[in-house]
Image: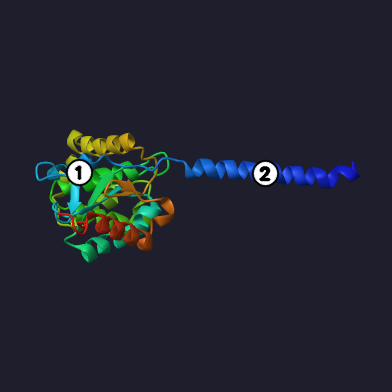
Amino acid sequence: MTRYLPFLIVVSVGLLTLGSGTMLYRAKRLPVLTIPKDEIAPGKDGIEEMHVLGSFEAPVTLEEFGDFQCPPCGGLAGPISQIEKDYSPRLRVIFRQFPLPAFHPHAREAAFASEAAGLQDRFWEMHDLLYREQSTWSATSNPQLLFNAYAGMLGLNIDRFEKDMESEQVKARVDADQLRGNALGVTATPTIFINGRAVPPPDLNVVGLHKAIDAAMKATLPVEGKP
């Protein structure tokens, strides 16, 4: 048996290498998530149905599917806000609700809180506050008390806020975003599309997003010699 041991080791290593190569090949061939061109950017008629920062005439659109209890989403919230300012008026940011309650038990409630705030024209303020205070409300058994406190901090009508959180209108808006995400193949958060093309997970950072936006900006420029 001992005389065959080197041979067996070589064969085993070869099989492992082949298996790893096959997995890598399959990973490289995974389809890149994309949004059809006619669905990338809303016109004036559809802009009220989503949460948008920036001009609807911007040539580049960053569309994020996020979960308010997702730590990586929270880590990107501030940078994305700054990126929108850095590229203004050439970039607009769209936020889509994609709570994953199987992993984040309070995520759906937080989505309702942001939409209820949105009905009083404070969506982005609540969006920022929920991410900034994520570690606090995520750790409580009853985050509603904190959501109410946040609504008060933003000057909202608390009674209306609580009723809106329970309303079918708010639930329908969250469900609509999730249906869109499901149709596009979104399974995790954050998932970010730049002009309809999903940013690879390793590039979901400030440097990667700048690189993807710059490439999209360049692609929108007219080709020399063509109108």
At a point 14% along the width and 45% down the height, the residue shown is: 47
At a point 34% along the width and 46% down the height, the residue shown is: 142
Q: Where is mark 1, residue-wise?
A: 162
- Residue 205 is situated, as x and y percent measured from the top left of the image, at 38, 59
Marks 2 and 1, how far apart at CA: 57 Å
Camera-near label (2 vs 1) is: 2
**Crowd tier of the residue under label 1, counting other residues whose Cα lies within 10 Å: few below 14, some 14–19, many 20 or above:** some
Q: In the image, is 138 to the left or to the right of 154?
A: right
At a point 37% along the width and 41% down the height, the residue shown is: 100
**Residue 40 in view:** yes
Q: Nearer the viewer, residue 83 or 165?
A: 83
At a point 74% along the width and 43% down the height, the residue shown is: 12
Q: In the image, is 221 to the left or to the right of 131?
A: left
Q: Amino acid at mark 1?
A: Glu
Q: Earlier in the sequence, mark 2 or mark 1?
A: 2
Q: Quadrant of the N terminus?
A: top right
